[in-house]
């Protein structure tokens, strides 16, 4: 990795941020040369976030202060970016001093990623009770909708309950929605109308991770 040089600049105290990452949350650390490394939050203190970097030991960061850095991680409303000045406390530990308020740089509501995941749909009756479940697969997902491979028997406007298995070993994401569109291939576009905050956060994190994998594959020339 190219050594990071310290840059001089005006210092300013951190302002309150609306959304901080959680302890043990995986994040991306962006260095001045736009190098991007996976990291994990180990501690959050007033005005500071401590990270453990998942770096190859043969290519460590230099000890000492470095230039301005930024964190990116999925939040409830989209991709959150926090800027600050990092201090390399060890070869794989960075202390990021916050320099300003966080910014939602991209709303996940409008980002759609291709993903084939197990899904189940059940039509809702007038009382909101689900009928028989039908197994299907997702084609792509976004923060406000899911394209399902079927069933082609659901007409547009049908209210549905859905379950999507995004991560092996974790419970499915569950919510309610409505069939908003149908394709000639029999796909059904489900507009999400009801989703818990926790499940929405998990869905955003899944979309964020799929994008990160796609960027890495593109960078490595695998696509």
Image (tube, grey):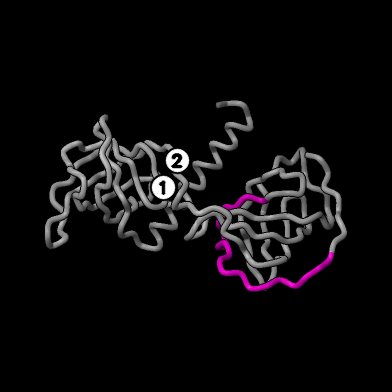
- Asked whether disc 2 touches disc 1, contact meaning CB atoms under 8 Å apart, the reply is yes
On the image, the x and y values in percent for residue 189 come to: 30, 43
Task: Residue at 47% x, 46% y: name it.
Answer: 111
Please state the total of marks drawn on the protein image: 2
Residue 81 position by quadrant? bottom right
Q: Answer with left or right where residue 147 lies relative to residue 87.
A: left
Residue 129 position by quadrant? bottom left
Question: Circle 1 is placed at which residue position?
Answer: 142
Secondary structure predominantly adopted by residues drawn in magenta: loop
Image quadrant occupied by the C terminus:
top right
Task: Residue at 38% x, 39% y: name it.
Answer: 140
Q: Answer with left or right where residue 142 lies relative to residue 118.
A: right
**Placement of 130 over or under 150, stated as above or below:** below
Q: Answer with left or right where residue 57 lies relative to residue 107.
A: right
On the image, the x and y values in percent for residue 9 come to: 85, 61
Question: Circle 2 is placed at which residue position?
Answer: 113
Task: Residue at 72% x, 66% y: name it.
Answer: 99
Image quadrant occupied by the N terminus:
top right
The magenta-colored residue range is 10-29
On the image, the x and y values in percent for residue 8 come to: 87, 59
Marking on residue 47 = none
Task: Residue at 38% x, 47% y: name it.
Answer: 169
Instruction: Reply yes or no: does residue 79 show up in magenta.
Output: no
């Amino acid at each position: 990795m190219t050594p990071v040089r310290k840059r001089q600049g005006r210092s300013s105290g951190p302002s309150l941020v609306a959304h901080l990452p959680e302890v043990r949350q995986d994040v991306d650390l962006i260095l001045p040369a736009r190098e991007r490394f996976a990291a994990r939050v180990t501690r959050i203190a007033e005005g500071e976030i401590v990270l453990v970097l998942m770096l190859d030991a043969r290519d460590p960061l230099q000890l000492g202060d470095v230039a301005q850095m930024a964190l990116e991680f999925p939040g409830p409303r989209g991709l959150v970016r926090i800027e600050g000045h990092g201090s390399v406390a060890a070869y794989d530990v960075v202390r990021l001093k916050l320099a300003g308020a966080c910014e939602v740089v991209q709303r996940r509501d409008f980002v759609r990623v291709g993903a084939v995941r197990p899904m189940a749909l059940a039509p809702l009756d007038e009382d909101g009770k689900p009928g028989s479940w039908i197994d299907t697969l997702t084609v792509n997902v976004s923060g406000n909708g899911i394209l399902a491979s079927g069933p082609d028997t659901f007409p547009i406007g049908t209210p549905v309950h859905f379950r999507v298995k995004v991560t092996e070993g974790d419970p499915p994401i569950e919510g309610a929605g409505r069939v908003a569109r149908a394709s000639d291939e029999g796909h059904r576009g489900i507009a999400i109308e009801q989703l818990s905050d926790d499940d929405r956060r998990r869905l955003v994190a899944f979309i964020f991770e799929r994008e990160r994998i796609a960027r890495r594959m593109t960078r490595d020339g695998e696509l």
